[in-house]
Amino acid sequence: MIKADFHLHTEYSPDSIAKLEDLYQKAQKIGLGKLIITDHNTIAGAVKIQRKYPDFVVIGEEILTTSGEILAYFVQEEIPEGLEPIEALKRLKDQGAFISLAHPYAFKRNGWQPEEMIALLPWIDAIETRNGRNPKHLNLPAIQFAEEHGLPGTAGSDSHSLREFGKIGLELPDFSDAESLRKAIRNAVPFGEEAPAYVHLYSRYAVLNKKLRKKAESGNA
C-alpha cells in the first residue's frame, strides 16, 4: 500500500509557486509513494521531473473545459483548455488516461453539476470526492454521488503551495499505469482533512508574484 496526493499544482501553474524539486523532496519526506502532478492545462512540469524520477512521478493534468475541470492521470499528450467536455474526454480516452472530474459541486471553481456528471459517466473512471480546498459541505455531496453511481473517488490537496501538499489523498495498492490505477483505486482509503480557507491566499500571492516578476523582467528588457 502507498499514499498519494491526487491533485497538486507546481510552479508551472499560473497560481502556484511550489517548485518541482521541493515537491519531490517533501513527497519523500512525508512518505508518499507517488508524486502526481496535475498542473493547469499543461504537462510540461510533470514531464520535466518525470524524466528525473521516472518510477515515482505520474504525469497528470487539470484541464479546463467549457463546463468544468477534468483531472487526468498518465497523460501522454497535453490537452488544451477550452474544449467541450466530450472532446477533451475523447482525447484522453484515446491515450488511455485515467479520468476523474475535479471538485464537483464547487461551482465557483469550475465544478460539475450532477446532471453533467451523469451524462459523462460512460467516459470517466472516478470523480474527485475529497478536495482539500473544498469545505466539507461541498465534498459530502460528491462522496454521496460516487456511492450512488458505483464510482471510486480520487482525493487530493489541490495544493498551490508546498505547505498544503500531501495533507489529503488516498492510501491504495501501488500502481504503475492507468490500468493498474483503475484496479487499485477500488481498494483505496482516503486520508487527511480539508484545509482551512486561508490556503486560497497562497494562490493569490502566486498570481501577484508572477505578475510583478513579469513586469520587472519586461521593464529590464
Image (cartoon, rainbow, N blue to C red):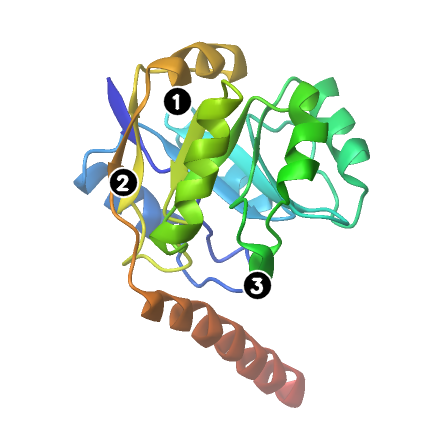
Q: Amino acid at mark 2?
A: Ala
Task: Give the spatial CA distance, label 3 vs label 2.
Answer: 22 Å
- Element under label 2? helix
Disc 3: which residue: 14
Question: Residue 149: x percent and y percent?
Answer: 53, 21
Residue 81 seen in the current view: yes
Is label 1 or label 3 in front?
3
Query: In front: 133, or 79?
Result: 133
Question: Residue 172: x percent and y percent?
Answer: 30, 20
Say the numbered circle drawn on residue 27.
2
The residue at 39%/37% (across/down) is: 155
Q: Residues within 10 Å of mark 2 (few under 14, many from 20)?
A: many
Residue 50 seen in the current view: no
Q: Amino acid at mark 3?
A: Pro
Query: In front: 4, or 59?
Result: 4
Disc 1: which residue: 55
Splitting the image into 4 quarters, where does residue 147 fall?
top left
**Outermost residue toward the bottom?**
219
Is label 1 or label 2 in front?
2
